[in-house]
Image (cartoon, coloured by chain):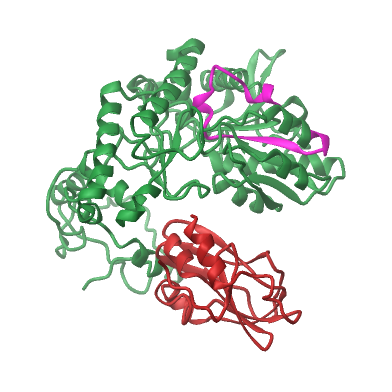
Chain colours: A green, B red
């Protein structure tokens, strides 16, 4: 964080009549348009009036307060805040991609369609799936798309089912998507290994279960070792298996969801395939399915015409669930993912997974004494440690997270997943060096020592930032989204 | 050590229940509110809703998480605590008093008999 002290909001800088723009006088040929009275607002909007220089300085100063992966380490568990290689940005900015018009005729954008076709083949190869749509704008929309496809598949067979099983360690989007798709989410608990409790799963499986949503490795960073058994049990009652690809970055190039028995897979290109993420978006959450589910994919479907020898958009798909995004998703993001894939190749991708897992296990070991993990064994790309041991000193996971900011690191995810008390969910990603991991681990160990020697320091942290501890409870209880003077 | 009034019974899901001639007042324990942190929203059923022992009754949202509240008994909702709409922080500041959640009409007499005493509950949370 740079810049100290507070500075005025853009509204407080406002002086009547100041402008950051100037428009020429309308010529004599300008059409005389006016907004009908019923569409005019009664009072003018309270927009700030500032000069161009004031405007530039204000937002530049604000931007200096941003934290990003380009600034420092960002071990935000579950979010895979890894470095996006700049080559992908370079490629996406080529004028041929940048100037594409979404309404251009097919014959004018064959190159772009070719890129999507090749990326679809590559991602299907990586997941072990048959077909894929790029329409979903991010993971959660991918989930909904997948569930609607599952629903259409069941409906086609005249099979009305009611429930979808979701483990208690799942991302909150899973039960939310299930509800949105018109089903009921049923939780299944984790066992002492931190994995799906297979016996508990068997108890809830019946012919009313439409499917199971699973993240593998799960949000505890643990690989669901019973996956083949789980897949068989779900398929036996006529259900489908949904793979939440949020953690695909830890297995890419190593093992494929299709081979584990999954029928539907979403990927987060903004996680595994290093495209911009979290405010730098937009995202892209392509959804891949087996051959059997392909007829239900959203239209338009990208197809290669063997006779015409060109790509085209196929809309004549009577079983399709329909369109779920305008045009064909967020194309610019797909270009970045393509560039990332091509620059690494299959071996490079496998090394990404290896390094992500190695880094997480190294950091986990560094801090194990101060912040142990409640489940035994090695982890995958992330781990969930507990700050429970500091409670007797009056220190919580929140205090540890806030104090870490003073050491120049973004805090890890806290209080998720819910199955771990005082959870610290750490994902260093494959792009951090050993030196950075040592510094991060050292900071966490020191914070644990400070909790014993000077708990007040942690309660007051961060001490180095212009804004210290916003009152989160007050903000949530009395949400104010509009600035008003005074 | 969190406060534990002995005039009521407790569940292993950290709800308390106090019976007054089949009217059962339900809330969450001091331990629970401390674990949840600052509570920012409480979602409760309307009067007349039927609830079942061990099934979700409503939810509490804190700055950390959203958690289900499980009904300690089977019965019908008589009243929900309307004060919590504007002041959910009452659950934090007065969990056994003004931060109560619902009043239920129990379906059967002696509905609280299977629940834990203050002593047993105190021991259960000490092991945590």
The outermost residue toward the right is: A158
| Left or right: A146, with A295 as reference point | left
Q: Which residue does the image show at 15% across and 47% down from the upper left? A: A57
Residue A480 showing in the rendered view: no
User: In the rendered image of this protein, does residue A276 appear above or below residue A480?
Assistant: above
Q: Residue at x 39, y 59 (%)?
A: A33
Is the residue A25 above or below the residue A44 in the image?
Answer: above
Q: Which residue does the image show at 56% across and 27% down from the upper left?
A: A105
Q: Nearer the viewer, residue A294 or A313?
A: A294
Return the x and y of residue A39 as percentages of the image width and height: 44, 67
Quadrant in which the C terminus of chain A is drawn: bottom left
For the question of whether residue A65 can be seen, the reply is yes
Place residue A9 in its image quadrant: bottom left
Q: Residue A359: x, y in percent?
A: 39, 24
Extent of the magenta region: A235-261
Where's residue A332, x and y in %?
Answer: 45, 30
Judged left or right of residue A471, residue B54 is right
Identify the residue shown where x is 50% and y is 61%. Answer: B125
Image vertical order of residue A261 relative to residue A77, above or below: above
Count of marks, rendered view: 0
Q: Residue A277: percent from the left, percent from the top?
A: 40, 36
Note whether B104 is above or below A356 in the view shown: below
Q: Classify the position of the N terminus of chain A by image quarter.
A: top left
Q: Is residue A194 magenta?
A: no
Q: Is residue A256 magenta?
A: yes
């Amino acid at each position: 964080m740079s810049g100290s002290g507070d500075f005025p909001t853009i509204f407080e800088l406002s002086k009547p009549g100041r402008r950051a723009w100037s428009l020429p006088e309308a010529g004599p040929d300008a059409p005389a348009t006016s907004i009908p009275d019923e569409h005019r607002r009664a009072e003018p909007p309270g927009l700030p009036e500032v000069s161009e220089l004031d405007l530039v300085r204000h937002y530049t100063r604000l931007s200096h307060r941003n934290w990003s992966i380009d600034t420092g380490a960002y071990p935000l568990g579950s979010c895979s805040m890894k470095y996006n290689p700049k080559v992908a940005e370079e490629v996406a900015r080529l004028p041929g991609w940048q100037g594409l018009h979404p309404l251009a005729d097919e014959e004018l954008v064959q190159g772009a369609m070719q890129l999507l076709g090749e990326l679809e083949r590559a991602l299907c190869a990586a997941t072990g799936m048959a077909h894929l749509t790029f329409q979903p704008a991010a993971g959660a929309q991918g989930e909904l798309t997948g569930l609607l496809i599952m629903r259409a598949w069941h409906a086609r067979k005249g099979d009305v089912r009611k429930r979808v099983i979701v483990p208690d360690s799942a991302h909150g989007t899973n039960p939310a998507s299930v509800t949105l798709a018109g089903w009921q989410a049923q939780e299944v608990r984790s066992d002492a290994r931190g994995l799906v409790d297979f016996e508990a799963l068997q108890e809830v499986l019946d012919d009313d279960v439409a499917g199971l949503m699973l993240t593998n490795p799960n949000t505890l960073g643990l690989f669901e070792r019973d996956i083949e058994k789980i897949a068989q049990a779900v398929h036996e009652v006529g259900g489908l298996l949904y793979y939440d690809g949020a953690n695909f970055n830890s297995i890419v190039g190593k093992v494929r969801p299709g081979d584990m028995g999954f029928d539907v897979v979403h990927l987060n290109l903004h996680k595994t395939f290093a495209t911009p993420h979290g405010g730098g978006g937009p995202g892209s959450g392509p959804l891949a399915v087996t051959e059997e589910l392909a007829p239900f994919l959203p239209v338009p479907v990208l197809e290669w015409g063997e006779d015409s020898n060109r790509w085209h958009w196929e809309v004549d798909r009577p079983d399709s669930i329909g369109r779920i995004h305008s045009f064909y998703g967020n194309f610019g993001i797909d270009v970045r993912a393509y560039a990332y894939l091509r620059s690494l190749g299959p071996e490079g991708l496998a090394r990404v997974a290896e390094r992500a897992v190695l880094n997480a296990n190294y950091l986990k070991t560094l801090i194990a004494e101060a912040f142990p993990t409640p489940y035994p064994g090695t982890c995958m790309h992330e781990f969930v440690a507990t700050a429970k041991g500091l409670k007797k000193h009056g220190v919580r996971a929140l205090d540890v997270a806030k104090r870490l900011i003073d050491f120049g690191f973004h805090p890890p995810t806290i209080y998720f997943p819910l199955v771990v008390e005082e959870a610290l969910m750490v994902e260093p990603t494959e792009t951090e060096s050993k030196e950075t991991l040592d510094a991060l681990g050292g900071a966490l160990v020191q914070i644990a020592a400070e909790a014993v020697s000077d708990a007040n320091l942690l309660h007051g942290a961060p001490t180095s930032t212009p804004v210290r501890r916003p009152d989160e409870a007050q903000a949530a209880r009395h949400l104010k989204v509009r600035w008003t003077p005074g | 050590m969190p406060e534990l009034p002995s005039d009521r019974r407790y569940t292993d899901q950290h709800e308390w229940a106090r019976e007054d001639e089949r009217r059962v007042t339900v809330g969450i324990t001091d331990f629970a509110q401390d674990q949840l942190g600052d509570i920012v929203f409480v979602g409760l059923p309307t009067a007349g809703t039927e609830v079942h022992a061990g099934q979700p009754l409503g939810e509490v949202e804190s700055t950390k998480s959203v958690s289900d509240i499980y009904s300690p008994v089977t019965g019908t909702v008589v009243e929900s605590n309307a004060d919590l709409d504007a002041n959910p922080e009452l659950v934090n500041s007065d969990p056994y008093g003004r931060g109560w959640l619902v009043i239920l009409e129990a379906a059967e007499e002696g509905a609280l008999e299977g629940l834990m005493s203050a002593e047993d509950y105190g021991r259960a949370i000490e092991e945590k």
